[in-house]
Amino acid sequence: MRANERMLRALARVPARTVLHVARRFAPVLDAGIVDEGGCTYLAYCRTRVALPAGLDETGRECWVNSLHVEDWYRTHVLLAALGFSDAVFALWEQHHGRRDGLVCLISKNRVAGSARHAVVWKMHRHRPGQDWLAPDLSGYDDAVLELTSRNDIALVKAQLCLRG
């Protein structure tokens, strides 16, 4: 797990002990499952709605396709919704590929220009040496950024939130 200081501050503002179940609202995405195509892994829901871009490596294509604005699905506790959704996607990955490692979920939070609202964007890609979506140093991002590599990372974040309460 990696997070920049902005994300740590954003997570510190999440109400402690708040439990959020994401299955109901994200059911169309999760129920569609995962599909492997051309060496890439996509959420089938996203793949049917987005054309593959030219000129990107596999990680770039996956992040382009596997991208959701969480605030379109949830209005409150959006960071928790993104964590819960990541947990559900890791579970799908484990079912589909029979292993716990090899997937990366990314969550970023930024202010919508000209508004008091925040956008929380979720992305996913396979772990590939030499093909990282994020820079090695997350402190250079203006957005709050969180990189998760397993369900253990999510459990750690949630445990920290509960311990705080």
Image (cartoon, helix red, strand yellow):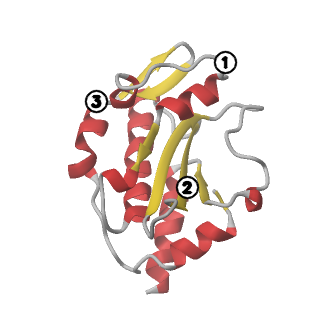
Residue under label 3 = 32
Left or right: where does residue 108 sit relative to residue 26?
right
Q: Nearer the viewer, residue 18 or 70?
A: 70
Secondary structure at numbered mark 1:
loop
Tell me what residue is drawn at x 38 percent, y 33 percent. 95
Select label 3 or label 2 by which is in front. 2
Across the whole image, how many numbered discs are drawn on residues? 3
Rate crowding at label 1 as few (under 14), some (14 to 19) or many (20 or more) other CA atoms within 10 Å.
Answer: few
Question: Can you tell which quarter of the image residue 134 is in?
Answer: top right
Secondary structure at numbered mark 2:
strand
Image disc number at residue 108: 2
Tell me what residue is drawn at x 79 percent, y 55 percent. 137
Q: Nearer the viewer, residue 57 or 119?
A: 119
Name the kind of residue labelled 2 in the image: Ser
Q: Nearer the viewer, residue 82 or 91?
A: 82
Check the image and report above or below for 130 versus 10.
Answer: above
Residue under label 1 = 55
Tell me what residue is drawn at x 50 percent, y 25 percent. 41
Image spot of residue 38 (x, y percent): 54, 12
Q: Which mark sits nearer the N-terminus, 2 or 1? A: 1
| Marks 3 and 2, how far apart at CA | 24 Å
Tell me what residue is drawn at x 68 percent, y 70 percent. 5
Question: Can you tell which quarter of the image residue 102 is in?
Answer: top right
Q: Which mark sits nearer the N-terminus, 3 or 2? A: 3
Rate crowding at label 3 as few (under 14), some (14 to 19) or many (20 or more) other CA atoms within 10 Å.
Answer: few
Check the image and report above or below for 163 versus 55.
Answer: below
Image spot of residue 44 (x, y percent): 36, 26
Name the kind of residue labelled 1 in the image: Gly
